[in-house]
Image: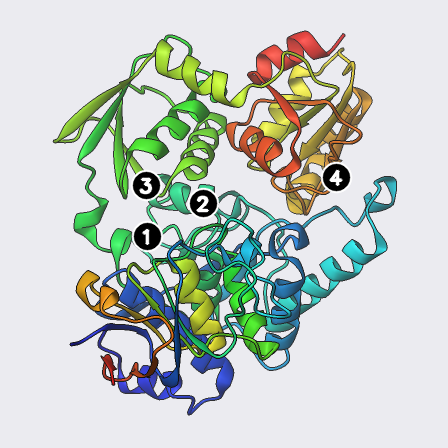
Amino acid sequence: MTLKVIVKGKAQGQVMIAKKPINFLGAVDKKTGKIRDEKHDLFGKSLADKILVFPFGVGSSVGAYTIYSLKSNNCAPRAMICSKVDITTASGCALANIPLVMATREEYDSLTDGKKILLDAENGKIL
Amino acid sequence: MELTKEEDASLKGEYGETLALAYRVLVAIGEATDADRLLPIEWAHLSGVNYNTIGDAGEEFLANLSKDAKFKVKTTVNPMGFDPDTVSKYDISEEFIKKQNSIKNSYEKMGAILSFSCIPYEIFDLPKNGTHVSFAESNAAIYANSLANLKTNKEGAFSALASALTGKSPFSDLRKDDSRNPNLTIRMKTEQKDELTYGMLGYFAGKVAGCSVAISGVKELDRRSCKSLCAGMGTSGTCGMFTLGDASGETMDFGKEEAQKIHDELNTTDSGDIITLGSPQLGLDEISDLAGMLKGKEFKKRCMIFCPRTVQEQARRLGHVNDIERAGGELLSDCCICLTPLIDKKDVDGVITNSVKGAYYLKTSNGVDVNLKNLAQIIQEETT
């Protein structure tokens, strides 16, 4: 299985799956890494140190700065896996140096919430 | 993506974290847009300057970045939140001013030309035909591709910033000649042909078109209508270029009905207590026109007019500023209507403007109602 690498790197951690797209600017608290949008399925949960799996980012491109802030405040995900790449998430992960890959539908659906994985975003593999 | 040895070394951090960050952004965007390599650009125009748009996270990021980053190519910047000459007349918090000044200082430290303008194509000399630039301001990107013989994608704040730091951009979308050929033609069918109609045409086209669109049925476009068309198009979608005349492929009509539908969407009130002109900012010929139209007239209400600093200085020497101020107009530089902190819904019920882009942002960001009408109508109805 080969993933499309958007931002290179390696990360190990627990998979956290969001069903809904994420608006980093509005829905994520940059100081704690918690989802603060009540309508989001991860409401109240912290993204810190997770391998965040979500469909794609939505909302203002300024959300990229939020991803950078999460990293500066030590509450960012260790890596992100999306099914579709948007420029905001790509820019934010690049600024913050957080590995980001794009998965095909099949690869995406094979991920299990809570499972520990090693994401090799140098070679595009999940181990 | 294939990188040169030099680019790859930069990406790996051999020339420091700042360049590594900039190359990570270019590679990430390049991978996301299926670019196979980077190419050199000669000029970057940055968005993300107004504190209202980038907030604390942006301010902190830029302050941090500017500690050791330097722009490699000519870099100009979009408007900020206020005009330092007149800011004391507005209810702008100390905090806002402090954060805005920090952003300004960061860009200056990195070597930007502090143009604070959304019309770089009108106030700077243009590079030779076919030159690649990296423009983040949407109206400027569309103008550059469509009317100034330059090549750029409709860049975002981060891709343009990374381009400024590296002098490179991913070779994708509108940088490739085949993507510049439109496969949709919009036929202009309205009888009304003023700047507002062209703005609505742009807004309509932006909604339905891909990368590039052809517009037919347009005979003459003055500068005001051109800018309005570019700004409207940049507001509603991802389309980054238009050509004039018919193209092969699908066709759509933009007639009275389509124009009315857009007017109904953006015009939310029939009156306003303040007038704003200049989204995009006005150039010297528009200021000169306006001064002429205002001869012997006076605005019935407050009228804010946005133009670049250099344009205001030239207009002052030519006497136009005097004419406009005598008619009650206020000229503001370094800022614009989009996400302005100068208009607050607690003080204002409705804003009158001829700008489709201005109308969209006033409604969605400032939460005020908008009365959208063309400049001739504004002068006729709102002056004595």
Q: Amino acid at mark 4?
A: Leu
Q: Nearer the viewer, residue B162 or A96?
A: A96
Q: Sequence order check: which comes first, mark 3 or mark 4?
A: 3
Same chain, labels 3 and 1 = yes
Disc 4 target residue: B342
- Residue carrying label 3: B241
Disc 2: which residue:
B138
Q: Quadrant of residue B108?
A: bottom right
Which amino acid type is marked by label 3?
Met
- Tell me the mark number nearer the camera, choosing from 1 and 4: 4
- Quadrant in the picture for the N terminus of chain B: bottom left
- Residue B345 place in picture, x, y as percent: 73, 31
| Residue B288 percent coordinates (x, y) | 63, 27
* C-alpha span from label 2 to label 1: 13 Å
User: Counting residues from the N terminus, which is met first, the one under dot 4 or under dot 2?
Assistant: 2
Q: For residue B151, which numbered disc appears in the image?
A: 1
Tell which tag, 3 or 4, sits nearer the viewer.
4
* Left or right position of B265 against B113: left
Q: CA distance from mark 1 to mark 4?
A: 34 Å
Q: Chain of mark 4?
A: B
Q: Position of residue B168 (x, y in %)?
A: 37, 69
Q: CA distance from mark 2 to mark 3?
A: 10 Å
Residue pictured at 17% horizontal, 36% vertical = B183
Q: Are marks 3 and 1 in contact (CB under 8 Å)?
A: no
Q: Which mark sits nearer the N-terminus, 2 or 1?
A: 2
